[in-house]
Image (cartoon, rainbow, N blue to C red):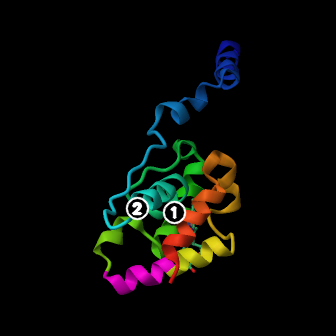
Amino acid sequence: MRTKVAAILLLLLSGLWLLPVFLGQSDAVEIDAEALPPEVRKVFIHSCIPCHSSSAPLPRIGNLEPFRYFLVRRKQMATKRLDFDQWAQLNSNKQELRRQKIRKAIEKDFMPPLDFRFFNHALSDSDRAILLKWSRP
Ligand code: HEC
């Protein structure tokens, strides 16, 4: 009994439970949207895709519960509004509509969500400039 408790304690203390975070799928994601200019795509991949593409893997922390649970739900809400997986199939009106929504989200500093910015996904000034220029009506 005592050794069991000791073993569990050792496991917890050793940080082994964090392993799935490092061994799981990486943060690397791609975007299948040929219609987007490369510099714009790059910004989306860096700051938006983890939530706004149904096929992109969750950020690494999503390999761990309870983060997984919240990330999956959040991603469902995000892709309902904007899913880059579908971008290439949208007609030009719909693309334009989403472009204006993206513009508003950037202008109002609404996206990416504040907490996500801590994980090195914030938009730099030049990222913002790229998105604003691309989405200008
Ligand atoms: C951490 C996850 C996450 C990231 C990263 C993220 N979003 Fe979102 N986004 C959401 C969620 C969740 C919603 C839905 C919000 C709601 O329904 O209130 C949303 C909604 C939106 C909407 C829809 C707003 C509307 O009025 O319909 C746009 C546009 C948007 N995001 C753009 C972006 C852009 C551009 C980026 C990158 C710069 C980005 N998002 C990054 C989670 C995210």
Q: Residue at x 57, y 43 (%)?
A: 61
Ligand 1 closer than 8 Å to the CB at disc 1? yes
In the rendered structure, the answer to whether residue 62 lies left or right of residue 95 reads: right
Q: Which residue is mark 1?
A: 75
Residue situated in front as seen by the camera: 55 or 70: 55
- Where does residue 81 sit, x and y in percent of width and height? 49, 75
In the image, what residue type sits under mark 1?
A: Lys
Q: Quadrant of ligand 1?
A: bottom right
Q: Is residue 39 left or right of residue 114?
A: left
Helix or strand or loop: what does disc 1 sit on? Answer: helix
Q: Which residues are magenta?
A: 91-99
Residue 77 seen by the camera: no
**Contact check, label 1 and label 2, Cβ < 8 Å:** yes
Residue under the point 61% across and 58% down: 126
The residue type indicated by label 2 comes to Ser
Local packing at callout 2 (Cα closer than 10 Å; few below 14, some 14-19, many 20+) is: some
Q: Give the x, y percent position of residue 129.
A: 59, 65
